Amino acid sequence: MEKPVVIVGAGLAGSEAALQLARRGVPVVLYEMRPERGTEVHKTGYCAELVCSNSLKSKKPESAAGMLKRELDVLDSQLYELALANAVPAGGALAVDRETFARAVTQRIADSDCIELVRREVTALDDIARDASAVVLATGPLTSDALAGAIADLAGDYLAFYDAAAPIVMADSLDMGVLFRQSRYEDSQAASGEPLGDYLNAPFSKDEYERFIDELLLAQRAISRDFETKDLFQACQPIEEIARAGRDAPRFGPLKPVGLTDPRTGRRPWAALQLRAEDAQGSCYNLVGFQTNLKFPEQQRVFRMIPGLERAEFARFGVMHRNTFIDAPKLLDQNLRLHSEGASKLGVPVYVAGQLGGTEGYCEAIRSGLHAALSVAAHLKGVLAPRLPLETAFGALLAHATDQKTRDYQPMHVNFGVMPQFDPPVRNKRDRYAAYAKRGEEALAAYRGALAACGLAGE
């Protein structure tokens, strides 16, 4: 009997990798420790449960996040398909109903004849590698201590940083006489008088903002040691840490009021918090950009100072948790294969997918799981996997993450900054973004053709 591919971790990356290999007829054993062993932030035993936010970022084609979604679409991502099927309104972004999305992913895995889902914690890698044709590590940022130790032994090096998740409040506890529904730069009402926009907005006056910042800076944090900025991933800075950088910093970040008009005054507010629906029914809302490390009673006290949230009931408080990732530039190649002395001793190829490899972001995790699956499938077929072009969104991110010249590596989202620049430069930003998208589309089509030519397209 053909030895299965063993995947550790049924998050976004591991679930996508398992489903992609199953589509290609490859047997998979997928290990997931939940619900046997939980984490500080997961609430269910579902595969692909989202914990920090329910947003998968912009759908705009001429954005880096939009280009990445286009890759997921063209390469037939299973989780992207399910995300679209379980989407909730979020303006120009793709956001999902957490529970229905995770349940759908779990069901698709259960329905596959090629995937065996094993609910137990993996604490050692020798045992699972013994009867495997390849191993994919996709345990994510909340890798258990025991397995993190095993990965450290395997990789010879790993890093940890801290990430933060935003609170969620119940919709029926919000003051809709203060909050208004509007997406940025859109009219707040249609001609019929019906409200428009996918976000609720909490408008601050200058005095309200100043009082809020005063209390935010004085509030007690949950973790006693004083985190320095370098310990916190920049894209997920807690709101109190942003405020510590300067009293106006939140007003130019998560609380920026640009593109919004308070219908009570007809003017732009001094600052504004946006709230995004967490489920299709709009029964609860996420405080966008309000990742936090405050103690729970302090969150309730301080965040109820936000206009419209004076009586807010919290479905989930914000939490701080550890993220674990390996030093990818030293350890991974462009196929996401791990090259280290410890890995060679296992006797089977080892691949790393998702945030454990330092590619930060939901869609990035899904895409890395898809990429790892293609690499494994190529290995099993004895063919050379086509090289992912630098001009694609994930190709550029992968090149950055596996560049041995990179020092002091930190996790990275897809962005135009890591993509090859134009020579001569395209000066107009809108034209430049359109050019990135056009060039990426052409490179993606060529890559898709190369996959088909060597039998890896999965059709």
Image (tube, rainbow, N blue to C red):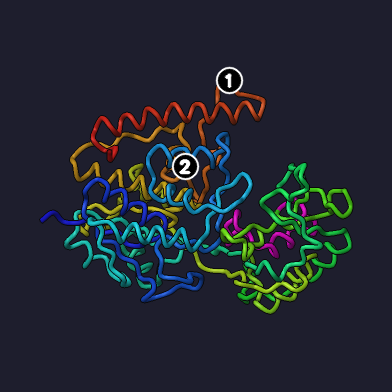
Camera-nearest residue between 187 and 436: 187
Give the residues drawn in magenta, as a range: 228-253
Q: What type is the residue that disc 1 sits on? A: Pro
Image height of 266 relative to 290, above or below = above
- According to the picture, the residue beneath numbered tag 1 turns out to be 424
- According to the picture, the residue beneath numbered tag 2 turns out to be 397
The answer to which image quadrant residue 204 occupies is bottom right
Looking at marks 2 and 1 on the same chain, the residue that comes earlier in the sequence is marked by 2
Residue shown at the point (54%, 42%) measured from the top left: 65
Q: What type is the residue that disc 2 sits on? A: Leu
Residue 395: image location, x then y, percent: 43, 38
In the displayed structure image, the side of residue 325 where residue 301 appears, left or right: right
Mark number, residue 309: none
Residue 245 lies within the magenta run:
yes
Measure how far apart labels 2 and 1 are at the Cα level: 22 Å
Residue 373: image location, x then y, percent: 31, 48
Residue shown at the point (66%, 51%) measured from the top left: 198
Camera-nearest residue between 446 and 150: 446
The answer to which image quadrant residue 128 occupies is bottom left
- Which quadrant of the figure contains the C terminus? top left
- Which quadrant of the figure contains the N terminus? bottom left
Is residue 410 something one can see in this rendering? no
Camera-nearest residue between 293 and 101: 101
Residue shown at the point (31%, 30%) measured from the top left: 450
Q: Secondary structure at mark 2?
A: helix
